[in-house]
Image (tube, helix red, strand yellow):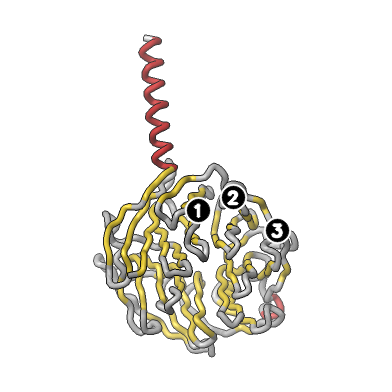
Amino acid sequence: MKKKTIIIAIALIAALSIILFVSARAGLKRLASDDFYVWSRVSLRNIGSNGKRLVAVSPSGVDAYAVEEHGGYTYRSTDRGENWVQLDSKPDADLVTALIVDRNNRVFAGTSSGLYRSTDKGATWTRCTKGMWSYIIDAFALDSEGRIYAGGDKNAVYRSDDGGNSWKKIGIGQNIIYDPHINALCITPEGHIFAVAYGSIFKSDDGGKHWINLKLKADYDIIAIFAVDDNQLYISDYSSLYTSDGQGNCDRIDLGSNIIGEKIRCNTVTAAPNGHIIIGTSDGAYISTDKGKSWKKLNTTICGFYRPNIDSISIDSKGRVFAAAGSSVFIGVPK
């Protein structure tokens, strides 16, 4: 009986080792195409986890990262998304809410325990909060000079001029009467900064010295913003997508309903190098080639994912799209 128990135990250990290996390494499955991209999908499934993931790709597109929102389990590809491995190291936080890679391949993670940085492609992570008052970091942005900006709690937008070694507060407290939480940031090519504090959008034209409230209102708290320029903003809340001219006018874009009648929600918005606007929604990814006047659904609804909920999108300098939906990352190569 003892010998039989030992044999069963060895078999279970061997089976678990296979599962761990499979979960740690994943390769692309080439699946489908549409008018704009050829799509592939990779499954990054940690044992016991199927939650939201954040994705970020380096500007060159060679290195890509996906981090689980809950737990911070981190995956990396060093060959443009062809193959992925689960890393042993991760940000030391319960919740990861923002992810970005700068031009020097430094990876930054905003978490419920502050800001973490990796300078060795995710092999190790260090908490880098010198000069910060915030305990929570929810948003990142990069300007044209490669400087990184971070937004979080305690009325704070920060900028680092040295790759995250130290931070300078350029907050917006003088403009509002309550203590805001910065949950979205973006910067135009001209260097103008847009920051979202709950339902309000603030803008700075002088590197954060002064801010104005644009008084643009959405139905719910704003969760994403993207500025093509000062006069072309895209804003997402928990319900809808809006366009704005940056002058106080805001128009709702009706994305319609999915096949079972649910209203389509917009989770994230960004732009490709060619100027096309791409959004991640509760019904997959959509693209606009005419400044938001019309939208076409991209063919990420593949391989059993009829209505993937796209939580995060990152696009490299060549226009390759990395879109995270649950435990999957969809990769679109421009045609």
Image coordinates for residue 247, horizontal then vertical, percent: 54, 90
- Kindly report the distance in space between the C-alpha atoms of the residues bearing marks 1 and 3: 20 Å
Is residue 108 in view from this perspective? no
Image coordinates for residue 142, horizontal then vertical, percent: 59, 70
Do the residues under discs 3 and 2 have CB atoms within 8 angstroms?
no
**Badge 2: residue crowd in 10 Å (few <14, some 14–19, many ≥20):** many
SS for dot 1: strand
* Quadrant location of the C terminus in the rendered image: bottom left
Task: Kindly indicate the quadrant of the structure image that contains residue 181.
Answer: bottom right
Specify the amino acid type for callout 1: Val
SS for dot 3: loop
Q: Earlier in the sequence, mark 1 or mark 3?
A: 1
Residue that label 3 marks: 129
Residue that label 1 marks: 67
SS for dot 2: loop
Is residue 79 in view from this perspective? yes
Residue that label 2 marks: 91
- Kindly report the distance in space between the C-alpha atoms of the residues bearing marks 1 and 2: 9 Å
Q: Earlier in the sequence, mark 3 or mark 2?
A: 2
Specify the amino acid type for callout 2: Pro
Residue in the image at 47% along x and 67% along y:
316
Residue in the image at 42% along x and 44% along y:
25
Q: Is residue 309 left or right of residue 226?
A: left
Q: Earlier in the sequence, mark 1 or mark 2?
A: 1
Specify the amino acid type for callout 3: Thr
Name above or below for residue 239 compared with residue 78: below
Q: Nearer the viewer, residue 237 or 88?
A: 88
Residue in the image at 41% along x and 31% along y:
16
Q: Residue furthest left?
A: 259
Q: Nearer the viewer, residue 309 or 18?
A: 18
**Badge 3: residue crowd in 10 Å (few <14, some 14–19, many ≥20):** some
